[in-house]
Image (tube, rainbow, N blue to C red):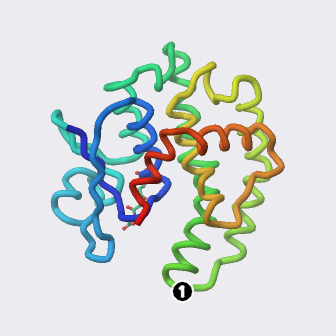
Amino acid sequence: MLTIYGFPFLTFNVLKVMLTAEYSGVIYRYEKLNPAKKEHKSPENLSRSLIGLVPTIETEEGHLGESGAICRYLAKRYQPALYGESLIDQGKVDQWVDVFAQEFGRHITTFFYQEVVRSKMMGQPVDAPAIEAAQKRLSWQLPIIDEGLRNHGHLVGQQLTIADLVAFAYLSISESTSFGFSNFEHINRFYGDIKGGEAFQKVQSQFEQ
Ligand SMILES: N[C@@H](CCC(=O)N[C@@H](CS)C(=O)NCC(=O)O)C(=O)O
């Protein structure tokens, strides 16, 4: 049995992992850790994640932290096509996953930390120059993502891979912040397709009160 650990509310890093689980077809249960009680810093979660963050997972063969590593593991273990059909496609999947974690996603995440974490959750003012700098980087990075989705509606090859699921998770930050991509035709179609799919609906239903 696979257990995925996250918070009682859905965050983008947990979303990457839950979508990968859904698309891989594995049966899992989701366990909610209470951030107010610092349950993600418990010895159990620290042993799973090295640094006490979520998502983490527990499986019959061991535990793991870091959303990218978990997505790769789940794909390889339960649905290898989600990691790309050939070695070069797998390299391209890694390329997109890494560039999202280190560049595109990092700037999109600035909107989340400023407008949701700092402003809504902590009651602190938004750092406008930080948002402006993130937007500036995204203004030349979003066209790269749009172009990547032009041909087959997927970032790698002709089928859905974890690169798409990671991309979707970061793009979902548009739901709760001023970050947007409405001018980008291919990103819009891609986002709508995954958002309207059964997998995302099933993930979301686990967070409805
Ligand atoms: N690099 C990590 C980042 C994980 C991360 O930042 N998790 C957030 C929730 S999305 C968290 O656990 N925050 C709690 C904290 O910072 O104490 C990953 O990709 O899994």
Residue 78 relative to residue 201: left or right: left
Q: Is residue 8 above or below residue 163?
A: below
Q: How many marks?
A: 1
Task: State the image coordinates of residue 30 (x, y, percent, origin top left).
Answer: 30, 51
Residue at x-position 31% and y-position 47% = 65
Residue at x-position 55% and y-position 79% = 120
Residue at x-position 71% and y-position 39% = 145
Task: State the image coordinates of residue 33 (x, y, percent, origin top left).
Answer: 28, 64
Which residue is tagged 1? 123
Quadrant position of the C terminus in the picture: bottom left
Residue farthest right in this picture: 183
Residue 22 figure quarter? top left
Residue 2 figure quarter? top left
Ligand 1 found in image quarter: bottom left
Front residue of 22/33: it is: 22
Quadrant position of the N terminus in the picture: top left
Q: Given the image, on which type of amino acid does mark 1 rest? A: Gly
Residue at x-position 32% and y-position 71% = 35
Task: State the image coordinates of residue 27 (x, y, percent, origin top left).
Answer: 29, 36
Q: Is residue 24 above or below residue 209?
A: above
Residue farthest top in this picture: 86
Q: Is residue 157 above or below residue 66?
A: above
Task: State the image coordinates of residue 10 (x, y, percent, origin top left).
Answer: 45, 59
Q: Is residue 61 above or below residue 205?
A: above
Tell me the element at label 1: loop
* Category of crowding for the residue at label 1, using alpha-carbon neighbours closer than 10 angstroms: few (below 14), some (14–19), many (at least 20): few
